[in-house]
Image (cartoon, rainbow, N blue to C red):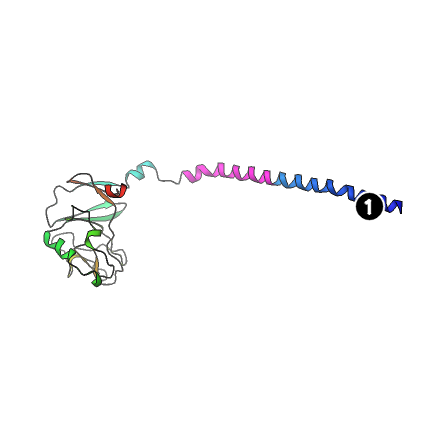
Amino acid sequence: MAHGAHGGGGAAAATPGHDTGETRRDFLMLATGAVGAFGVAAVAWPFIDQMNPAQDVLALATIEVDISKIEVGQAITVKWRGHPVFIRRRTPEEIKAAEDVNLEDLKDPQPDSARVQKGKEQWLILVGVCTHLGCIPLGQKPGEPRGEFGGWFCPCHGSQYDTSGRIRKGPAPQNLPVPPYAFESDTVVLVGAEPEEKKA
């Protein structure tokens, strides 16, 4: 009986030491894991950071365009981030036609005022890629077809855009996109830069 009591006491005395060992082991495992995770992050960071665009690439994110020689009714095409950008100096008639459109008639409703900058309504700047399958619409050069709405015509599947670059007819689902741009002066536009009113 005494032996049983002694045996029971021995078992009870061993339990606290056993718990302490597990607690210490758990702490060491957590600490080792944390140090390991920090080490992996420290090694991985230079590889992740080198995937950011280089300074020369960031410089190409904007292009400066001289628009001083574009006459009323003329258009030019420039390259920005590998895409053609259409810059058209619209006539008063083209502006009026764009402003007078009933938005309910549009597949992708957007007023002309949302696609140009206030006080510079004659300048329409668009990414010249059809929103259907990525073809380049015609209408930039004299003599090219501009479709029924006087804007641009995509020869691939017949999408037609108006003088605000909005889709009016054909399979294209959306208007020609307007890139970010800012006027540095009356004769220079910076494509890829946010306009001053958006920065404020």
Q: In screen coordinates, is 199 left or right of 16?
A: left
What crowding class fits label 1: few (fewer than 14 Cα within 10 Å), some (14-19), or many (20 or more)? few
Rendering coords of residue 16 (x, y %): 73, 41
Q: Pick the residue in front: 14 or 2.
A: 2
Which image quadrant: the C terminus?
Answer: top left
Residue 134 location, quadrant: bottom left
Q: Disc 1 designates what residue?
A: 8
- Which amino acid type is marked by label 1? Gly
Nearer-the-camera pick, 186 or 66 = 186
Report which quarter residue 160 is drawn in. bottom left
- Looking at the image, residue 159 lies above or below residue 22: below
First to last magenta residue range: 30-49
Q: Position of residue 14 (x, y in %)?
A: 77, 42
Tell me which corner region of the image, top left, top right, bottom left or bottom right, holds residue 50. top left
> Where residue 166 sits: x, y (%)?
21, 57
Q: Is residue 150 above or below residue 53?
A: below
